Image (cartoon, rainbow, N blue to C red):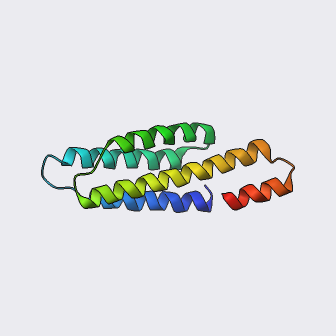
């Protein structure tokens, strides 16, 4: 795993830690628990995948699920927003990596441009 992905995973884990600490004992726990599960699953997907095409598809589904659940506390809502930003950043990195692999083989100028974008 590259440094940039490691940083994103660390951010997602931090977000997960915030979600764990934001629960209450009321009926909103279900939404907060679902948020925690979705973020956790996304982190596992990032850590466990070597196939960027597959990871890209999985993270799109994870983001779609994450956008359907809303936290019941301010901390849960903030954690959700941070998780969405983290997964979006990870997707941008994956797309840059895929573009590099597909389009830039042997082209130093294009490879440099894509490396800067990543």
Identified at 41% across, 44% down, the residue is: 41
Residue 8's x, y, as percent?
Answer: 51, 59
Residue 20 appears left or right of 9? left
Image quarter hosting the N terminus: bottom right
Identified at 55% across, 60% down, the residue is: 6
Question: Which of the 4 image quadrants contains residue 18?
Answer: bottom left
Can the viewer see residue 51 in this picture? no
Residue 86 appears left or right of 16? right
Image quarter hosting the C terminus: bottom right
Can the viewer see residue 11 in this picture? yes
Closer to us: 78 or 5: 78
Residue 108's x, y, as percent?
Answer: 85, 56
Identified at 21% across, 44% down, the residue is: 30
Identified at 29% across, 44% down, the residue is: 34
Closer to us: 2 or 11: 11
Q: How many marks?
A: 0
Closer to us: 86 or 51: 86
Question: Which of the 4 image quadrants contains residue 112?
Answer: bottom right
Residue 26's x, y, as percent?
Answer: 12, 50
Residue 92 appears left or right of 84? right
Residue 64's x, y, as percent?
Answer: 42, 39
């Amino acid at each position: 795993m590259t440094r940039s992905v490691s940083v994103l995973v660390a951010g997602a884990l931090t977000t997960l830690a915030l979600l764990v600490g934001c629960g209450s004992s009321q009926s909103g726990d279900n939404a907060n628990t679902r948020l925690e599960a979705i973020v956790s699953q996304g982190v596992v997907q990032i850590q466990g995948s070597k196939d960027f095409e597959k990871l890209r598809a999985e993270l799109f589904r994870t983001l779609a699920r994450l956008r359907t659940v809303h936290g019941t506390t301010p901390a849960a809502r903030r954690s959700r927003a941070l998780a969405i930003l983290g997964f979006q950043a990870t997707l941008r990195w994956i797309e840059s990596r895929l573009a590099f692999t597909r389009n830039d083989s042997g082209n130093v100028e294009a490879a440099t441009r894509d490396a800067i974008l990543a």
